[in-house]
Every structure is written in C-alpha cells, then in structure tokens.
Image: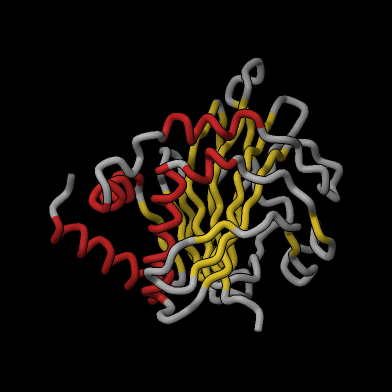
Amino acid sequence: MAGTQPLLQLHKNLITTVAKTGFSFCPSAAIQAWLLAQSDDALIDWSDFANSWNDMPLDQYMADGGRYRRRRYAVFTAPSKNGEILLEPHQPHYQSLNYNTLNGGIAREFEPIRSETIRSRSMQSVLKFCQKVFSDLMPDTPWHIECHQFRIESNEKTLGKPTPEGVHRDGVEFVLVMMIKRQNISSGTTTMHDLEQNTLDSFTLTEPLDVAIVNDRRCMHGVTPILPIDPTQKAYRDVLVVTFKKPQA
C-alpha cells in the first residue's frame, strides 16, 4: 500500500490536471494504489467483477445495424461528496441527438447491471473514487450517476467500434472510462479533442484499471475501432463507463 503523502499528491495532481486541461489519463498502478489506500479489500473481488462482462446481452439499438456491442446499465444518485451512493429504480437511458447523432433521440431500454455486480467491492470502490474526484472538481453538487458495462467485439468480418457515434460529448459533467480487459485486439485508442474537434491528445487504455477522466463540458472524446490480432480467436474490449451529471431542475 502506498504511503499517505504520495497518494495525496497523486489526488492533487489528478484534480489539477483535469481542472487545467479538461481530461487526464491515470495508469492502473496509480488507481490501484489510491483504491487500496481507502480500503485493503477495495479490489478483493476484481476477478468476479471482471467476469460479469461475460454474459451481457447485445445492444439492440445500434442504428448502424451493428451487432458488435454488448452492455448493461444502472442509475445511481448521491446527494454530496460524502453522501451515500444510492441505486435508483431501473430506467431507460436517454441521450439527445445533440450528443449522440447515431443512437440518440429515443429512450433505450438496456438490461440492468446485475445486483451482485453493483454490490461488489470493486464496483463500490470505483463509484466512491468517482464521487470524490468529481466532487472535488465541482464542490457541493448532488449527482445523477449512470454506469455502463460495455463489451465491444470484433472479428475478421466485423469492425468493433467503441464509439460508433464518433468524436462526441455525453451531455454530462464528468466521465470516467475504466479498462476492464482487452482480449486479442489492436487499436482502441482514446482520442481527446476540444469543442471544435481539434485533437488535444491520444492514449490507449491497455491494463485493467487504466482510467480516462473527462470534463465533458470542456472536451470531446472518441475511441478508434478495434481489430482482432488473431482472427481465429475471440477479440473484445471491456470497459466500465461512469458519468456524473447535475440533476435536472
């Protein structure tokens, strides 16, 4: 477990970077150190947590006709930085066409994230990490939180598109994208852009717990399509996406 002072500096550096540039890449080792400093058992069930991506249904709402995306979804609320994160009744996911020109404009019904996955120490630890970071960036804010499990699949006939809508914003305050697993794939590079879509940076989430954090009001983001390295083997990219938004008045 890392010492307190380096972790405080890590947290400060993360907040400073996101406040200055609108985004940050956080490597797995740093995220693990931060989570384990909060609780020794923060990631004790990581293997089961990661395996929960293995039985997800296909996304039936792909306007491009694609059958390469699987997902589950859940909604939470939190009253403040230190308030309890509460699971809300299951509900449709909605994005306007302003933010999702491909699949937006309709209420999309996705299967809920399984209760045992939500209760897991790994999920709860990640949610608490988001709550602390995003509340430090925007103090005294109650939060509407959405959580998405995504698996993007690829084979010799199918290009896997992590962001089929292209470079985009999500219409929230903050976004966390956490790598869960890359299996037999190349590319899948995250690209960061200003609001005029000028490229600011790019990086690839490769290790479990690698994280990208985005101020969605200031930056746009995308991910390049994935391809199988060995076309005879399964190829996929598993990520957890967590968004934090001010509740609508």
Closest to the observer: 167 or 70?
A: 70
In the depicted view, which residue is nearer to us: 46 or 97? 46
Q: Position of residue 170 (x, y in %)?
A: 64, 65
Q: Can residue 199 be seen from the camera position used here?
A: no
Q: Specify the color scheme.
A: secondary structure
* Residue at x-position 28% and y-position 64%: 11
- Residue 1 position, x and y percent, is 18, 44
Snapshot quadrant of residue 239: top right
In the picture, the quarter occupied by the C terminus is bottom right
Q: Position of residue 124 (x, y in %)?
A: 43, 50
Residue furthest to the bottom in view is 249
Q: In this picture, is 189 found above or below 104?
A: above
Q: Residue at x 35, y 48 (%)?
A: 27
Q: Residue at x 64, y 67 (%)?
A: 169
**For residue 44, above or below residue 175:** above
For this view, does 171 lie left or right of residue 189?
Answer: right
Query: In which quarter of the view is residue 132 placed?
Result: bottom left
Q: Identify the residue at image location x=57%, y=31%.
A: 185
Nearest to the observer: residue 248 or residue 196: 248
Q: Position of residue 221 (x, y in %)?
A: 58, 61
Residue 247 makes an appearance in the image: yes
Q: Quadrant of residue 94?
A: bottom right
> In the rendered view, would you say 214 is above or below 186?
below
